[in-house]
């Protein structure tokens, strides 16, 4: 009599990922490891044997969001493992949610996987070893056509408002050949846009003294410029260079060297620079690096070399000690800098940050008033910059294609090279071809614009 042995069902893991793109990369790596260990992924609470919550602990408001997410996961599933930046505050998490199974800190991949193995042991059958194991690039929490490429962890700065070094440690750069190998795999798997991220992209390789590694028959330094140049040599399956977008770039002098790479088409003409403020007094109080750089003069030179370059940044208003003169200085600086994309934040104390002990806190109503004025100025600049693109034809990467309307017309949403996903604007298209698909890069003629977005039609 023939007998059959039923293979045990795979244990399933759910994931809630909060915070920045760097945390999203951590989530992808954790899930990739777990899938290699025989776990399946659950898209909802109900189907999960255990739920991972990757937390953010940068601001008090982010901690509140993390605690709420943990509470929801416990309510909906009951079996929850916590990781990420807020994992450094295990006592606070357990005080709020004593039911959590385990708590680990930021980028502690081994401890997270071990906790999952403990509380939901993998159901490995006798033939699991015959299953091909996935590569590091297999599990993505972003759409297939763009990917975050994390090049380092941690930060060497001591900014007064920030606790990232306490959460994630000092700068630890990845080997340049490992970064390039991951980028190559991502592009081969369909990535059309690489978003280079870290806590300080400009400092890449400083901790390893910019060590060299062999790549494709030649030596490459662990240095932002060298890495950017090599990433610009990658090609998609269609033979096109992927968009390579640099984030979290501090304006050190050597950043000047990447601008010609943008002019040559090797890099996307886009820089995300966390200026945070412009007034010298506030920058000194913030303990910001590179605050003596002649930034406005360098911005002019960058635009001379690469006229299409888009600069995005974020600014904090209401930092302790910020005077009305300091704030007006920032607004005047912005008028001259003419940044393309700007995010604004009201200063918020973070437990453990040095800024909490600074004198002369700014009243909440003053913060709100300054934030509104900041947004008014930056929105006006953005409106004028986008209006100048009307009538031009620009490349756009497609994020989403809609369904035909009653007339059979199809619309789509995409982004220009000046727009990073999630944080910048969009390009809305009309009358696109039925063959258009997510990830395509097409030329679009811009017909209209508002304060944040563009509207156009395929050229």
Image (cartoon, rainbow, N blue to C red):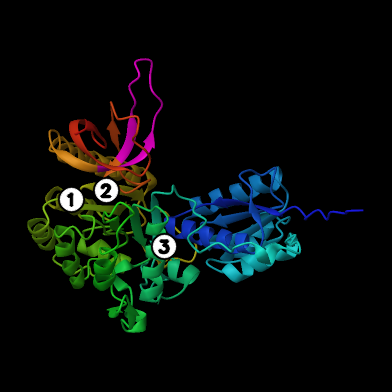
| Residues at marks 2 and 1 touching, judged by CB atoms closer than 8 Å | yes
The tag on residue 334 is 1
> Is 245 in the magenta?
no
In terms of secondary structure, where does tag 1 sit?
Answer: helix
> Going from the N terminus, do you reach mark 2 or mark 1 first?
1
Q: Can residue 425 be seen in this view?
A: no
Closer to viewer: mark 1 or mark 3:
3
> Is 410 in the magenta?
yes
- Looking at this view, name the residue that lies furthest to the right: 1
- Looking at this view, name the residue that lies furthest to the top: 406
Name the residue nearer the viewer: 370 or 395.
395
Q: In this view, does 75 lie to the left or right of 213?
A: right
The quarter holding residue 395 reads top left
Q: In this view, does 340 lie to the left or right of 132?
A: left
Name the residue nearer the viewer: 251 or 90.
251
Closer to viewer: mark 2 or mark 1:
2
The tag on residue 72 is none
Q: Can residue 452 be seen in this view?
A: yes
The quarter holding residue 403 reads top left
Tell me what residue is drawn at x 31 percent, y 75 percent.
216
In terms of secondary structure, where does tag 3 sit?
Answer: helix
Alpha carbons under labels 2 and 1: distance apart: 10 Å
Q: Which residue is labeled 2 in the image? A: 342
Closer to viewer: mark 2 or mark 3:
3
> Going from the N terminus, do you reach mark 2 or mark 3 first?
3
Could you tell me residue 234's position as x and y percent?
30, 62
Could you tell me residue 34's position as x and y percent?
62, 61
Could you tell me residue 292's position as x and y percent?
18, 69
> Going from the N terminus, do you reach mark 1 or mark 3 first?
3
The tag on residue 185 is 3
Q: What stretch is highlighted in magenta?
A: 396-414
Name the residue nearer the viewer: 314 or 191.
191
């Amino acid at each position: 009599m023939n007998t059959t042995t039923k293979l045990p069902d795979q244990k399933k893991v759910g994931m809630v990922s909060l915070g920045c793109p760097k945390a999203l990369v951590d989530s992808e790596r954790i899930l990739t490891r777990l899938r290699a260990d025989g776990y399946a992924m659950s898209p909802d609470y109900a189907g999960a044997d255990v739920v991972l919550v990757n937390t953010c602990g940068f601001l008090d408001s982010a901690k509140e969001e993390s605690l709420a997410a943990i509470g929801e996961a416990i309510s909906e599933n009951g079996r929850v493992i916590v990781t990420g930046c807020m994992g450094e505050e295990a006592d606070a998490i357990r005080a709020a949610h004593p039911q959590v199974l385990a708590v680990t800190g930021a980028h502690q991949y081994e401890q997270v996987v071990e906790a999952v193995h403990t509380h939901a042991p993998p159901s490995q059958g006798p033939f699991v070893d015959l299953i091909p194991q996935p590569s590091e690039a297999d599990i993505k929490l972003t759409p297939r056509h763009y990917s975050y490429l994390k090049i380092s962890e941690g930060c060497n700065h001591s900014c007064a408002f920030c606790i990232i070094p306490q959460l994630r440690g000092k700068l630890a750069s990845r080997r340049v050949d490992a970064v390039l190998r991951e980028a190559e795999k991502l592009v081969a798997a369909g990535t059309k846009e690489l978003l280079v991220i870290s806590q300080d992209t400009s400092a890449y390789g400083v901790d390893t003294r910019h060590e060299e590694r062999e790549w494709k028959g030649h030596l490459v330094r662990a240095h932002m410029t060298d890495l950017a140049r090599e990433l610009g040599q990658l090609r998609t399956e269609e033979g096109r260079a992927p968009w390579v977008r640099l984030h979290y770039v501090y304006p050190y002098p050597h950043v000047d060297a990447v601008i010609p790479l943008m002019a040559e088409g090797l890099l996307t003409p886009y820089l995300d620079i966390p200026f945070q403020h412009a007034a010298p007094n506030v920058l000194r109080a913030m303990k910001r690096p590179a605050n003596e750089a002649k930034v406005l003069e360098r911005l002019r030179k960058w635009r001379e070399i690469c006229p299409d370059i888009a600069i995005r940044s974020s600014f904090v208003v209401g930092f302790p000690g910020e005077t009305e003169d300091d704030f007006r200085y920032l607004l005047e600086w912005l008028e001259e800098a003419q940044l393309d994309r700007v995010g604004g934040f009201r200063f918020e104390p973070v437990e453990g940050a040095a800024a909490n002990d600074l004198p002369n806190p700014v009243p909440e109503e003053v913060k709100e008033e300054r934030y509104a004025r900041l947004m008014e100025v930056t929105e006006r600049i953005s409106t004028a910059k986008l209006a100048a693109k009307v009538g031009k034809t620009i490349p756009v990467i497609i994020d989403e294609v809609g369904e035909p309307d009653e007339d059979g017309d199809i619309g789509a949403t995409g982004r220009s090279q000046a727009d990073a996903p999630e944080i910048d604007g969009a390009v809305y298209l009309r009358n696109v071809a039925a063959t258009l698909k997510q990830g395509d890069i097409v030329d679009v003629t811009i017909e209209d614009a508002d304060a944040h977005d563009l509207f156009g039609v395929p050229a």
